[in-house]
Every structure is written in structure tokens, then in C-alpha cells.
Image (cartoon, rainbow, N blue to C red):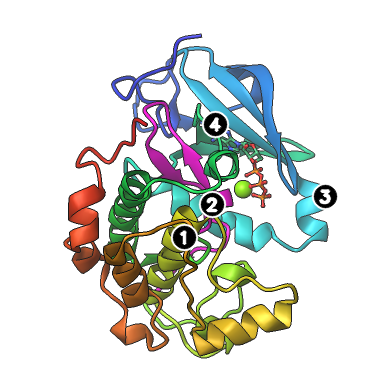
Amino acid sequence: MAIATETQPLQQHKVNASSASPVEQRRWTLNDFDIGSSLGRGKFGHVYLAREKTSNHLVALKVLFKSQLQQSQVVHQLRREVEIQSHLRHPHILRLYGYFYDQFRVYLILEYAPKGELYKQLQKCKYFSERRAATYVASLARALIYCHGKHVIHRDIKPENLLIGAQGELKIADFGWSVHTFNRRRTMCGTLDYLPPEMVESVEHDASVDIWSLGVLCYEFLYGVPPFEAKEHVDTYKRIVKVDLKFPPKPIVSSAAKDLISQMLVKDSSKRLPLHKLLEHPWIVQNAEPSGVYKG
Ligand code: ATP
Ligand code: MG
């Protein structure tokens, strides 16, 4: 199957061909798609490869059950995810083209990421080379700079939420925990290992939470495990709050990489290395592919 290219994007809203006014929009329905193989299963439903019949564009169709969404009280969260993700346009952010629903299900029309989950790649090779890690970190920094410019904080950056596109480029997926905000937030969210001290301690937080999580991710790319891992949750909490950061002797990691991680994993959120400075850090400049694409 041919993969649709950027030059033939799926329209966010379907324009009714029989309508005289191009402004009039018709909703998507399941009949607009040929459904292919299953791409995976999530908490609330399945993801299928699908082809939009008119454009031949391949997409990932995420099918969620309304009853499960209601039972788990995540309807509000899903609305926010859809609203935020559908407005973001960046090469390293997975597009959400649109959505529709029927009596029982909600369908999200997502950009298809043919190379799947980053998490699986990391499991396969245990840890990444410095070139590969730096390329990914730089592309994520660019995507987060774009999000923060739109007052969107992701708050849940981790390998499970990153997919790989056709060229090997990273795509941030899953905006379930993201917020659109002008204020500082106090909600407890995200996954433990990636939580910054201010979220563990439930004090106010802002966009610099994503710098912390990117620092944790950078560590995990290079060492294969997150930095504050512990057997018990309570011990992970303690290690995060103390910023108990240790660099094991193996695998061998350059001191420039360790320097960058140390500048991101800083307890005082206002002292974390800003993302535009991260892009100028010697480790990034020397290792990251300027194209943002790691080819192996
Ligand atoms: P949840 O988001 O509910 O916490 P999850 O991330 O495991 O759980 P989904 O986001 O629903 O689940 O996705 C399930 C699986 O389908 C993913 O793990 C991934 O392998 C695959 N998948 C999801 N979206 C895409 C996509 N756009 N392109 C390719 N594969 C995808
Ligand atoms: Mg997901």
C-alpha cells in the first residue's frame, strides 16, 4: 500500500461536494474509510490502519467506546485532547485530522506512524547511540517549543507516547494529559518516573515540567532506564524530590550528554535549561542530525 505524502493531506473537515458553499462541512462517517489491520490496543479501544476512500490517504483510526470513557470519567479529558491536538501542526507532532462518533463509539482520525512505537525500539536495542538520542531530543525540544508557544504543556512526555514516522522521525502522540493554559497548574498527572519534583509535591507548575520530562527521557535514551527508578513508588518519589541523579559507569556516556541532563533535571523549575538553549548545547550541536531524522 502506498503511503500518502504530505502533499496530499487529509482535509480536517470534509467539504460537501454537492454543496455550493465550500464553508459548509459534512461530518466524517465510518463509510468514508476502508478498515485494515489492527495497529494495537489501548486502554479504551483499538487502533486500526484505515484508508480514506476519496483521497486514498492512510490514517490510524482510533476507536473508543463511549461507555468505557464515561465509566472512567475521561470524557472531559478526551475533549481537551481532541481540541488541543487537532490545532497543532508540527513535523514532530502526530496530526489529529478529525473525529466522528456513532451511538456507541468515538473515532479519532490520526496521522499514521508506520514505524510504530519508540518504546519498542528502545526495548530492542536497550539504549540508543548518542547521535540517535540527540536527534530525538532535539526534535522533541523543537516540538515542545512550538507547543509552549501556543500555551500548550504536554505533561506526559515518555517513550510510550512517542511514535515513529515513515522517515524515522519522532512524533509526539497522546495529548491526554496536555493542557492549554495561561496559568500555573496544580493538577497531579502523568506517569511517576517522569514527574518533576513540583508535580510530585503538588505545588504549582508550568511549561518547565516538559523540560524535566525531556531530561528524564534523554537519560532513558542513553542508559535504557529512567534515572529515578526504584522498586517501590514511594522510593521513586523520594529520589525525584531529592533529585537523586546518578550516572552509572556503563553504558559509557559522554560528559557533554551528562552535562545537558544535569542542566535539565534541576529541582528549581525556573533554573532548568530553556529549550532554545538546549538546542545550542554542544552535545546537541555535535550529535543531532540537522534534518531531525535519524536514519540509523
Ligand atoms: P492509552 O493511550 O489509552 O493510554 P495506548 O497509548 O497504549 O493507551 P493507543 O494510543 O490507543 O493506546 O494505541 C494503541 C497502540 O496502537 C499503540 O501502542 C501503537 O502501537 C498503535 N498506534 C496508535 N496510534 C497509532 C498511529 N497513529 N500510528 C501507528 N500506530 C499507532
Ligand atoms: Mg496512547
Residue at image x 32%, y 63%? 257
- The residue wearing badge 4 is 27
- Badge 3 crowding class, 10 Å Cα cut-off, few under 14, some 14 to 19, many 20 or more, is few
Distance between the alpha carbons at the discs numbered 2 and 4: 33 Å
Q: Note whether 107 is above or below 7 in the view shown.
A: below
Distance between the alpha carbons at the discs numbered 3 and 4: 22 Å
- The residue wearing badge 3 is 67
Residue at image x 65%, y 27%? 48
Ligand 1 contact, mark 4 (Cβ < 8 Å): no
| Helix, strand or loop at mark 4 | loop
- Badge 4 crowding class, 10 Å Cα cut-off, few under 14, some 14 to 19, many 20 or more, is few
Q: Give the camera-side residue of 92 and 242.
A: 242
Given contact means CB atoms under 8 Å apart, are the residues at marks 4 and 1 in contact? no
Residue 84 within the segment the image draws in magenta: no
Which quarter of the rendered image does ligand 1 occupy? top right
Please tell me which of labels 1 and 3 falls first in the chain: 3
Foreground mark, 3 or 4? 3
Asked whether the viewer can see residue 174, the reply is: no
